[in-house]
Amino acid sequence: MTNSMMIFILISALGAPSTKALPVGEMALLDGEMAFPVGEPDWGQAIEASLSTLVSHQESMEPAESRGKKQVQLREWPYEGVYREGGQIPPGYRVGGTAIVMRSLIEVPGLKKDSQRVGSVMRGLSFLLQESLRAPRMGSGFSGGYDVRDWGHIESLETILRMQELKVVPGKLKKPCHELVEKLISTLIENEIPGGGWNYSRRRQSGASSPASPFMTAPAVMALMRARDRGYKFDLAVIDRALDTLEAARLESGAFQYSTNPARVTGEGFEAVQGACARMAVSETALWLAGRADAKRVRSAVDAFLEHWEWLEKRRAQTGTHNPPYYIAPYYFFYAHTHAARALQALPEEDREPLRQRILARLWQVRGEDGSWNDRVFPRSSSYGTAMTILAFRAQESPLPKVMKPKILQPEETSKEVPAERKPSSGTAL
């Protein structure tokens, strides 16, 4: 019996819920220019409505002729950005988007009592088991100068690990999920950039070195740390190498370079704090977990996100990708909120809730009239934005990986060279 057939049996009696969207109240001014819905935010009702909406938005992008008669059709939540492969949304976006929505569905309490949510998650799981490593586009390797497969691998890995931690993997699928985790880890190691880390944009020239992307490397590090914590065996040096690239990308201002290149620091555009404020918290959190950053650095990163939030808001749901002056792409918006919320776990307990409320207030003020959240011009990507908002809301109840002991650098390690940076083109955005 195939994994898809197992899941079909588990959920065949489940139906799809209706979409419930909440209206947004009138807008009032905050700090002169920023607006927010009048009245006390009802996050409980908003999350409940969002769960139903996400379940109802589950879809299938599989060609009709390839669908088996007994195969569940609606299994995915593709992320949609400007990048296409052969005119189609690439499989890395399909896997990554599905994994993120699934994670939001399992992080909210009451899953086991919600049959429609369970059914939706199980359909998504069948998709991840089947598509996360489907060759050639999701296997080992990198194609051309732009390839988002590892983004899908990272998000799939994190989601399966959280499902295991929350004990929501069905008994018959525990072995397939365990095997998928092992293969995802080995694939990420195989796809590692020489020198450490990961990037969805690389040089096209054969054998040319490429820099790591903190945007992608920091979440990968945390997913691999979670796998380590769950007892999966692999060479942990891959984590150290990735952390080295994050440290090398950190500037004196606290900003992180768009791509790691300490030999070419400008401190402007991408590298200004305004341009880096969306990736600072996730990078410092990954380093903090390894003993390479303290709580003050993490707090400074969260403060920078809040202080320069207006620049993220100016790019939310806009066309184009890396537009001046700070070259912030729209896809950084909810990414920044979710990882800033996760970063609060590194701070003293008394500091967490006030900062959490400030992050949630920012999210509430950009809630759409239909009750969803979206930072792209594509309606489909509201599933991603809504899921990331749920993950930000639930971040304090979703534990980070265990804190590692600090690494003591040997003298020869401090002079390690890092590959030179390639300036991103208009195609280097999700």
Image (cartoon, helix red, strand yellow):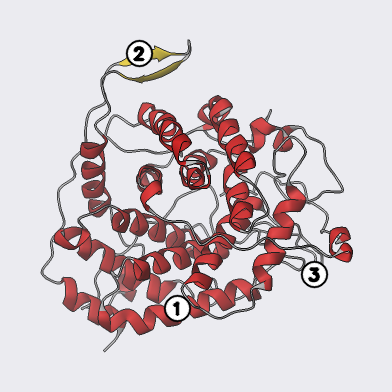
Badge 1 amino acid:
Leu
Specify the quadrant of the image occupied by residue 277.
Answer: top right
SS at mark 1 in the image: helix
In the drawing, what numbered circle is on residue 232?
A: none
Identify the residue at the far top of this view: 32
Task: Give the residue at the far left of this rendering.
Answer: 13
Disc 3 from disc 2: Cα separation: 55 Å
Residue 139 visible? The answer is no
Q: Residues within 10 Å of mark 1 (few under 14, many from 20)?
A: many
Measured in 3D between alpha carbons, the distance from the residue under mark 2 to the one under mark 1, in whole angstroms, is 48 Å
- The residue indicated by pointer 3 is 206
Which residue is identified by label 2? 28
**Which residue shows up at 31% across the image and 80% down it?**
173
Say which quadrant the N terminus sits in: bottom left
Q: CA distance from mark 3 to mark 1?
A: 30 Å
Residue 38 percent coordinates (x, y)? 29, 18
Circle 1 residue: 180
